[in-house]
Structure formats: C-alpha cells, structure tokens
Image (tube, helix red, strand yellow):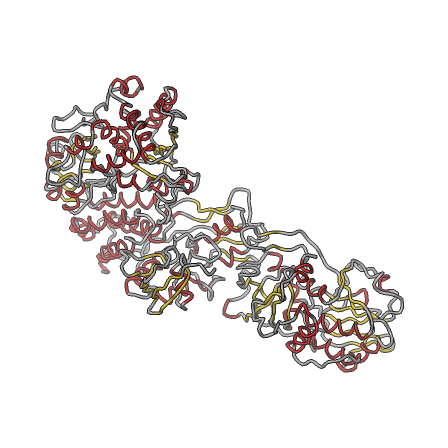
C-alpha cells in the first residue's frame, strides 16, 4: 500500500488526497461531498450510463461523469456549479417524463433516490405534455417484482446478476425509450442472492414481494443487527413498525458481507415476531407451572443445581456474553455445555470476497466452541443420570424425551417453552430474542460483531445475559454484571482468544479475534 | 463515376473507377486492374514506414469524424500484445450509401485495404463488420475473402511473405448504434451493441480488450492507392489553399435531386457546382430549399449556405456544418421541414441504445413534440422546450447519438423556424392529442 501514488485535488473547495485511480465520485465521498448518482454502486462495475453524476472539472471541455472519471493531480472539481446543476436537472427531468409519479402508492417512497434528488436538484414542475409510456408489472420470480414504469434503467440489477452472482438472468431488452429490464426466458430470480437487486435498485422498480405494501419507509424504526441465518454474520438492519419486525436489509461491511445479504437471512425476520412467546417467569408448584416473580423463579432455577452436575444445552444463536455466563455456571457446578447445530447447503456469492450462505445455520457456533461448548446431535451421552439441565434457547425440535430422561431437573431459559418439556420443567425463565437485546456474535472467520436492540420484549421477558447474570449470582458464582459491556469486559479479561477486544471499540463493524495467530486460525478452520 | 449514372468529367474516380464493372469483383479481374500490388509492396515494408506514408498523404477518416488515419495507426506500437483491425462497414447513417457500393463492386479493393491496414498496425487479425441489411455487399465481400484465402493472399503466409493476415466478416443485426466504434466492438464480441465509456480508447483497450484500430471502409480502400502511387500523388487531390483536406471522397446524393447516386470528387469541390452540374440540380420546376451535406447527424444548410460551401472538412465547418460521412440529402421547396426533421428524430429515437438517460428519454420526447407539431398540435412553448431539451441532450452522453438527434432540431429551428411557427399557428390537424394544451392557451 505504501507505494500507491497519492493524488491531491480540490472538490467543492475542499482539499482531498486520495490514491491514484480513485474516481472523482469516491474522492468527493471521502471529502464529505455527495455527488448525486444512480447507476454507480461501489460493489458493481462502473457503467456510467445514468449521467446523473456529471460534475464540472476545470479545464475539461465537457462535464465529466464523476463515477467514470479518475482523479488528476491539481484538478479543481465543482459539484454544485450552475453548469453541473443544470445538467443534473436535465437528467432528472428526462428520468421523470415517463415515470408514473406514483409515489403515494410506491413502496420505495421515502427511501427513493429519484425522490431525494428531485427534491434536492430537480424541477418543481414538468414540461412533458405527451402521453406516458406504460408497461405492465412483471413477476421476476423469487421475491422480486419488476415495476417497469418506475425503472430508470441504471442497470445495477443487471450488473449485479452478471458480475457478482455470475448468473446472467437479467438484461436490457429493446432500445430507445422502449427499453426495459428483461429476464432470460425460463429463468427466475431464484438464486439465494438475487434478492439484493431490490436493495440495489435506487428507485421503486424492483420491489420485494414479501414487503409489498406492508409499511411506509418513514414509519419504520431501524436498528443495526447481525443476521442469525448462518455463521457468515452478515451485518444487517432490522426494520420494525409498531414493534413488529417487517424486514431485514443488509448493512454494508467491506470485511463481512460487502453490501449483500442472502434470501435465507432476509426471510429469517419472521422468527423474531413469534406470538407464542414465554413472557412470564414460571415455577412448578404442586406439579403445576405457576406464574412467579423473577426473584423466585431464578432462585428455583438455581436450587435445581445444588450439589449436582450442571449440563447446559445452549443455542448457537446465544450471544458471546450469554455463553460466557453459562460457561461460568458450568464451572461452578463442574458440568458441561453442549449445543446442536442445523446444517444446510452452502451457497457462495462468487463475485464477492469470502461471502456465502454458510453450511452452519447459526450465528455464534464459533463463539460457542471458543467458550468450551461442544457440538452434539443428541443429548443421551451429555446428560448423565442425576444431572441438572438448563435448556437455553434450544427449542428441542426433533429431540426425543428419553434423551433428557436421566436429568434430575430441567430448567427452560428461552423465548417459547417447547411442548416436549412443558410437563416436566421445574422453571421457565422468559428471555429476549436476538432483536430484543444487545450483544456480540463471533462469525466463522473469528470476527466479533455487535448487534443492538431493535424491538421490545413481550411481557416481563428480560435480556438473556441479564437473566443469566442473576442466575450466576444465585448459584453462588463470582461477578455482578449490570451491562452487557461489563460481561464482555470479563470475557475478554479471562479468555485469551478475546484478549484485547473492547465492547465499545467493536463499533458496528466488529473486529477480528486478536491475535490472528496459529491458534486462532486453527480454531476457525474447525 | 456517378454510379448508377454515367461518369461526369468533373469527377475524380479513384475508388469508384470500377463501379458497375462486374469483372472487377473477381480476383482475376481485380488483379488485371492492378489489384493486390499495393498489398504485396506493403507486406514487404516496415509498418512504421506505412504509417508515416499515410500520415504524409494527409488521408483522414472517411466515416465522419475525419481523424488523420496515419496518426491513428501510429498509436499502435509493437508491444507484444495481439492487435486487431476493425473495418467499419456498418454504414447506417441516413443518406449515406457509399461503402455499400465499394463493397458491392470492388470487394477486393476493401480486402486489400484491410489486409494492408492490419499489417500497418501490427495486427494479424482483422474484422470487417458489415451492416446486417447489406445482403449483397456481404455476399460480395465474403466471396472475395474466400478467393483471397484460396489464392494465398490471406492466411498464415499472406502473399508468400510469411506474415499472417486473417480477415473475418461479421454481419450486424440491424442497429444503427453498432456503427459507433466501441458499440461495434461490443457487438463483435457478442455483447449488446452499447457504446463504451472512453477512456480507455480502442488503441489502448479495444476489441477483446486489446489494442485496436477501427477504420471506415472508404478510408481503408483509399490506402492501397496511396501505397501504390505515393503520398505526393494523393496530395494532388484537394484545393491548393487547404492542405488539411486531401484526397478524393465519395458523396452519396439522395432526396429531391435529378440524378441521385454516388459521386467521387476531389475534396474542396464547390458544392454549388456539385449539386447543379454533377447531380443535375433540382427536379424540373422545383427549387432546392435545404441540404444536409454529411449524413443526417450534421446541421442542415439552407440553399444559400449550401451554394457557398466547399466540399471538404474545413469548408463545411466554415458553412456551419460538417462533412460527416458524405451523405448528401437534398430537400426541395415542396418539402415540409417540420415533417422531415420529425422523421429524422424518429430515427434516432428508434436507434438510441438506451444507456444514457438524456438520449433514451430525450430522443423520444423530442420526437413526440416534433410529431405533435407536425400534426398541427404544437404550441408556442414547444419550440423553446425543444431547444432546451436539445441543450440537455448535447455533449453529456457516452456517444454522440444524442447530439445527433439534437442537431437537426437546433439547426432546423434556427433556419426554418417560420415553418414551425406556421404549423403551430395553423393548428389544422383534425386529430386531438389527449392532454396536449391548445395552441390558444399559450
């Protein structure tokens, strides 16, 4: 990197120094100047076709497309000069003449770049007096709907399918103002990564069928999260409306998922809206589960472990913090921690670096392994006769009741009490799901990433780490924790793999486990 | 010769000498007329020498832009990479049909020029891209290439010199835009014929990403004559006071003229004499009203402007237009300029590749307004809107198709505004366009 030539130029009066070969658009971005654009996307090859990013470069005979023009030493660039504004106003007018202007019924409204730039730089009225072009809506298969009338032919979707997915299903068909995005005969957007065209589309032309007419963009609350669909750990945004999760969208992270997210991850949002949630602590009294208060429930749960070996059946979607607290309890009771893992087919996104829907369909199996939990397929060997069992997050799907038969007691700590143990559990401690708490996951490359709370928990359910911290105290373990950051601090202080990591410093893009030495990478390749 | 008419003594038939002579189509006939002597000589000459010779001759691109051919060739250095020569035979500019006649009558002249050009730019492979609608020219060129291969003129050992020269023919599929050099390359590669962003220029990364030179049919056909006769010989063609425009040029004449056809004259020829003497002037009882001198993409001239113009690159610029491809379209006094310009813009709207927003939407919008005015539904504001759209369409796109659509509108409105205004004032169409404001509302 050191031998890359640096180029200095002036953009909107601000001095900028960027590596040689950078586009004016990216250079401007680094200086905090947004050059309006449609067809340009940092993850796709440059097309230079929307002509929206025209800027004035001194000594250039014509306006230059900022996306396709590289910086030059001493250049003076004007993004908002009268000439550049006039040109972009012209482009916006052209883009709108055949546009239906149906923002009131368009899903993209509120997050539409055509809307935004028109408000910022466009004409207030239209000079177009001719009949508008009309084309019917087309189903592109998968989760994608194509509304041709709103399309500005930026070709982001075509380039994504060609150059990133390597499945050239989309094309530009016809020419002139009859042109539209065509789909190859007999093919649909069924690739697990195809749904990204909806996010890439800067206007309301490509829409998610699942999200269609569900919510207006401005009604949504957004929180950064990490996808729990697999061990890739794609950065995501959880969007909620009235405390209901309505969709997950990718959040750019160069080191993990670039700008993308697969269909499995996107559709995973539904699990966070379950209506059969455990929302009150329950304790078995006289053979019946009775509503309890938190203190009694935690004490009841702690008591089941007195003088016994503790086996924790954890979910690989628990946060590092929760797993760490469980590890401590296991230490107090000389027990063991196990987890089950769902596996599925891997689906690589070939045009992106190290990005795939991974076979391990859980967010934190890597974290669970590094905190001493071992993977099992059934519990017969793990649960010995007389053991106290904590089921934490695992829904026990496909588990035969006999596998837990030897246990002296079962405590359920999770979001929805599985029917298979409803008649036997000693206590139920209702906790939050991933979108209702904050914490960290470790992805398959050993990157520790934070997620924040996106919605409120039902009833009196409490964050998993919080309940486990109370439980640890009740069991007689060391440490009182009032914040997830305190749990994480204890984690990084006691585990060398997590050494040097700071909860705040993780930011929203995460950091790799340090150091990335032989031991760390050996763990990762398990 | 003014094919299909008898040759006029004021013509200078160099390229068109054998138009109408079926024997010139065959290899034997072409050889009997001195064919392939230049290629043999060139293959034994260092490419740099040929580049310098062509540079010295003053030959400029005949496809429309007029870029000096020798200079274009000199960008190609022996860098070890594969080089390609593309011959642009996608002659689609409305009003232009000169390359068609070269390919129909003297296909070997083209094959010779292409092989020579390939050698001059260190290329072993050349492609002739022929407009899809040109069925006969395609058959003639393909037959000539077969003959040339069979005779050992092309192939691994071209003319026994040990040099490899392969020439392939590729047929277009009916898109005007594929005559744009980078769109042509995309089309050749099997992609959609969309123009590419420049830079990189073809000389750096052209066909298949390799250094490529692209020349027009007429340009390449002229080169063997220069190699055979020398640069000094070529320099005799042209007017003495303009050394920038050298050589002979084919002009295709169509429209309201007595003798439409192809004419070859030395550059600098007086346009008035050309129109009235060589081409026989307007039809009886009519008067020339306007002339498009270089294919539909160049500004329209009034009769007075045309009569004062000289037919070379600089002469046409002085008259406020361009030499372009040499496609002369003549309009007489019976023509409605609004109708004619509307027809031209419709062509561009149909042919826009749809990449750039300005072109995709602008050409179609312009056409809708033009056709509305044509049909008597125009308003006074339409003219200002047309000019404003034209301004937004010009100089802002990847290629010049957008500009080409704006050109006839701007020059037409400048020179024939009264015809537009008369149409608007008359408001005589019986058809009402829904949503269109009435002229009286203006």
Q: Please name whichever residue, B278 or A419, is drawn nearer the observer in this view of the structure.
A: B278
Question: Horizontally, is B314 left or right of A321 in the view?
Answer: left
Is residue A421 placed above or below A46 in the rendered structure?
below
How many marks the image carries: the answer is 0
| Location of residue A23 in the rendering, given as x and y in whole percent from the top left corner | 40, 58
Q: Position of residue B81 (x, y in %)?
A: 41, 39
Report the side of A383 relative to B434 (left or right). Answer: right
Q: Position of residue B399 (x, y in %)?
A: 32, 48
Residue A96 seen from this side: no
The image shows residue A20, relative to residue B105, as above or below, that is below
What residue do we see at 24% from left, 22% from top? B20
In the foreground, B149 or B274: B149
- Residue B252 visible (yes or no): yes
Give whichever of A519, A63 is nearer the camera: A519
Eyeballing the image, is A393 above or below A257?
below
Left or right of A450? Residue B231 is left
| Quadrant placement of the C terminus of chain A | bottom right
Q: Which residue is rendered at x = 17% and y = 46% of the image?
A: B317
The image quarter in which residue B380 lies: bottom left
* Identity of the residue drawn at 87% across and 70% down: A408
Image vertical order of residue B98 relative to residue B335, above or below: above
Query: Residue A56 sits in which quadrant?
Result: bottom left
Residue A354 image position (x, y, % from top left): 58, 55
């Amino acid at each position: 990197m050191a031998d890359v030539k640096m180029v200095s130029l002036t953009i909107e009066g601000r001095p900028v120094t960027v590596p040689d070969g950078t586009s004016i658009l990216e250079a401007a971005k680094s200086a905090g100047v947004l050059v309006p654009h449609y067809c340009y996307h940092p993850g796709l090859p440059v097309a230079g076709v929307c002509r929206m990013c025209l800027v004035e470069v001194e000594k250039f005979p014509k306006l230059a497309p900022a996306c396709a023009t590289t910086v030059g030493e001493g250049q003076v660039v004007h993004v908002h000069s009268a000439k550049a504004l006039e040109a972009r106003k012209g482009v916006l007018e052209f883009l709108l003449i055949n546009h239906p202007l149906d923002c009131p019924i368009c899903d993209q409204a509120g997050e539409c770049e055509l809307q935004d730039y028109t408000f910022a730089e466009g004409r207030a009225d239209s000079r177009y007096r001719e009949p508008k072009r009309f084309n019917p809506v087309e189903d592109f298969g998968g989760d994608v709907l194509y509304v041709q009338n709103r399309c500005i032919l930026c070709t982001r979707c075509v380039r994504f399918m060609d150059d990133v997915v390597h499945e050239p299903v989309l094309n530009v068909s016809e020419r002139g103002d009859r042109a539209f995005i065509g789909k190859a005969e007999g093919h649909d957007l069924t690739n697990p990564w195809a749904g990204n065209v909806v996010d890439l589309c800067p206007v309301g032309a490509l829409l998610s069928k699942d999200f269609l007419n569900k919510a207006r963009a401005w009604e949504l609350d957004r929180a950064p999260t990490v996808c729990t669909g697999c061990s890739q750990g794609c950065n995501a945004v959880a969007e909620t409306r009235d405390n209901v999760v309505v969709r997950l969208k990718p959040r750019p992270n160069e080191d993990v998922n670039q700008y993308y997210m697969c269909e499995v991850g996107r559709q995973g949002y539904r699990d966070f809206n379950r209506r059969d949630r455990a929302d009150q602590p329950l304790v078995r009294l006289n053979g019946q589960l009775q509503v309890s208060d938190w203190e009694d429930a935690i004490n009841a749960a702690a008591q089941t472990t007195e003088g016994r070996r503790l086996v924790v059946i954890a979910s690989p979607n628990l946060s590092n913090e929760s797993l760490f607290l469980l590890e401590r309890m296991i230490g107090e009771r000389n027990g063991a921690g196990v987890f089950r893992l769902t596996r599925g087919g891997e689906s690589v996104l070939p045009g992106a670096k190290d990005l795939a829907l991974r076979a391990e369909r859980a967010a934190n199996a890597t974290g669970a392994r590094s905190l001493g939990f071992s993977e099992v397929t059934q519990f017969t060997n793990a649960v010995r006769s007389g053991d106290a069992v904590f089921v934490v997050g695992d829904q026990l799907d496909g588990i035969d009741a006999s596998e837990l038969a030897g246990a002296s007691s079962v405590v359920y700590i999770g979001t929805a009490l599985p029917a298979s143990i409803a008649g036997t559990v000693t206590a139920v401690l209702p906790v939050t799901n991933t979108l209702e708490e904050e914490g960290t996951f470790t992805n398959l490359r050993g990157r520790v990433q934070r997620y924040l709370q996106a919605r409120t928990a039902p009833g009196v359910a409490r964050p998993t780490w919080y309940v486990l911290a109370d439980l640890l105290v009740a069991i007689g373990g060391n440490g009182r924790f009032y914040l997830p950051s305190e749990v994480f601090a204890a984690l990084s202080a006691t585990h060398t793999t997590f050494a040097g990591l700071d909860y705040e410093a993780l930011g929203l893009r995460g950091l790799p486990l340090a150091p990335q030495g032989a031991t760390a990478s050996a763990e990762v390749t398990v | 010769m003014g094919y299909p008419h008898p040759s006029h003594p004021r013509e200078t038939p160099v390229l068109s000498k054998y138009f109408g002579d079926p024997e010139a189509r065959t290899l034997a006939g072409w050889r009997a007329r001195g064919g392939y002597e230049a290629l043999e000589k060139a293959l034994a000459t260092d490419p740099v020498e040929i580049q310098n010779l062509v540079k010295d001759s003053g030959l400029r691109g005949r496809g429309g832009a007029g870029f000096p051919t020798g200079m274009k060739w000199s960008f190609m250095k022996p860098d070890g990479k594969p080089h390609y020569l593309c011959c642009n035979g996608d002659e689609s500019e409305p009003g232009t049909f000169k390359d068609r006649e070269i390919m129909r009558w003297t296909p070997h002249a083209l094959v010779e020029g292409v092989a020579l050009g390939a050698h001059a730019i260190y290329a072993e492979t050349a492609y002739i891209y022929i407009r899809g609608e040109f069925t006969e020219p395609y058959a003639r060129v393909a037959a000539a290439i077969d003959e040339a291969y069979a005779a050992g003129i092309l192939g691994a050992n071209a003319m026994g010199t040990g040099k490899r020269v392969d020439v392939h023919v590729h047929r277009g599929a009916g898109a005007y835009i594929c005559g744009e050099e980078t769109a042509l390359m995309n089309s050749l590669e099997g992609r959609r014929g969309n123009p590419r962003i420049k830079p990189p220029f073809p000389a750096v990364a052209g066909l298949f990403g390799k250094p490529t030179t692209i020349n027009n049919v007429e340009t390449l056909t002229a080169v063997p004559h220069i190699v055979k006769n020398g640069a000094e010989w070529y320099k005799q063609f042209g007017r003495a006071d303009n050394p920038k425009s050298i050589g002979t040029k084919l002009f295709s004449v169509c429209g309201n003229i007595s003798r439409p056809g192809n004419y070859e004259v030395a550059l600098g020829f007086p346009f008035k004499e050309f129109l009235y003497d060589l081409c026989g002037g307007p039809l009886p009882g009519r008067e020339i009203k306007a002339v498009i001198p270089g294919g539909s993409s160049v500004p329209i001239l009034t009769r007075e402007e045309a009569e004062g113009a000289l037919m070379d690159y600089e002469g046409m610029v002085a008259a406020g237009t361009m030499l372009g491809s040499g496609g002369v379209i003549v309009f007489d006094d019976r023509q409605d300029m609004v109708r004619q310009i509307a027809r031209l813009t419709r062509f561009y709207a149909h042919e826009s590749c749809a990449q750039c927003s300005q072109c995709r939407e602008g050409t179609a919008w312009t056409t809708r307004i033009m056709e509305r005015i044509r049909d008597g539904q125009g308003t006074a504001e339409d003219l200002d809107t047309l000019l404003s759209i034209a301004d937004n369409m010009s100089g802002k796109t990847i290629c010049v198709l957008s500009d080409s659509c704006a050109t006839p509108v701007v020059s037409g409105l400048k020179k024939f505004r009264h015809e537009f205004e008369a149409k608007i004032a008359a408001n005589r169409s019986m058809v009402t366009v829904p949503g269109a404001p009435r002229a009286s509302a203006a």
